[in-house]
Amino acid sequence: MSVLVFLFADLTPVAAVFGAVGAYAAGCSLLYLTCDADLADFDPRPAVRRVVEAGRLDAVLVRVANARFDVREAVAEARLYAALSLRELAVSAAALLALLTINPGATR
């Protein structure tokens, strides 16, 4: 209850009226949008089909295809770098192990 007192303590009557009207309008807008609505009214597929058939998305689709190619290329480079890094790590570890085990006096 103290939260409500804190929120509404500094409200002027004009601010309270405008706040109430705004809250009522926000609540009623959803009601008015959906009271007569059919499920087909919310289906975006016909609008998307018209946009695609008109060719308005061709540039976007080309950019998406190029981005997919760039991402695949970047992932392939990252995999190659990781494999080479692991191979270098394994070679370094084997060389260190060989240096430490071949000469018994090396650990003194």
Image (spheres, rainbow, N blue to C red):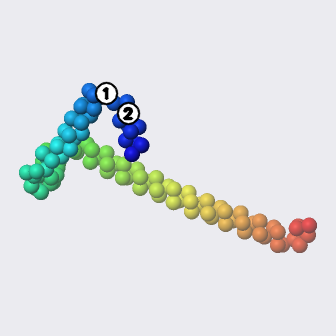
Give residue 64's mark.
none
Q: In what quadrant of the picture does the N terminus appear? A: top left
Disc 1 to disc 2, C-alpha distance: 9 Å
Total label count?
2
Spot occupied by residue 77 in the image (x, y as percentages of width and height): 50, 55
Which residue is labeled 2 in the image? 9
- Quick check: can you spot residue 49? no
Residue at 41% over, 52% down? 71
- Please state which of residues 14 and 68 is positioned toward the viewer in this rendering: 14
Give residue 12's mark.
1
In the image: residue 13, left or right of residue 84: left
- Quick check: can you spot residue 80? yes
Spot occupied by residue 44 in the image (x, y as percentages of width and height): 16, 52
Q: Secondary structure at mark 2?
A: loop
Spot occupied by residue 18 in the image (x, y as percentages of width and height): 24, 31
In the image: residue 95, left or right of residue 76: right
Q: Amino acid at mark 1?
A: Thr
- Please state which of residues 86 and 37 is positioned toward the viewer in this rendering: 37
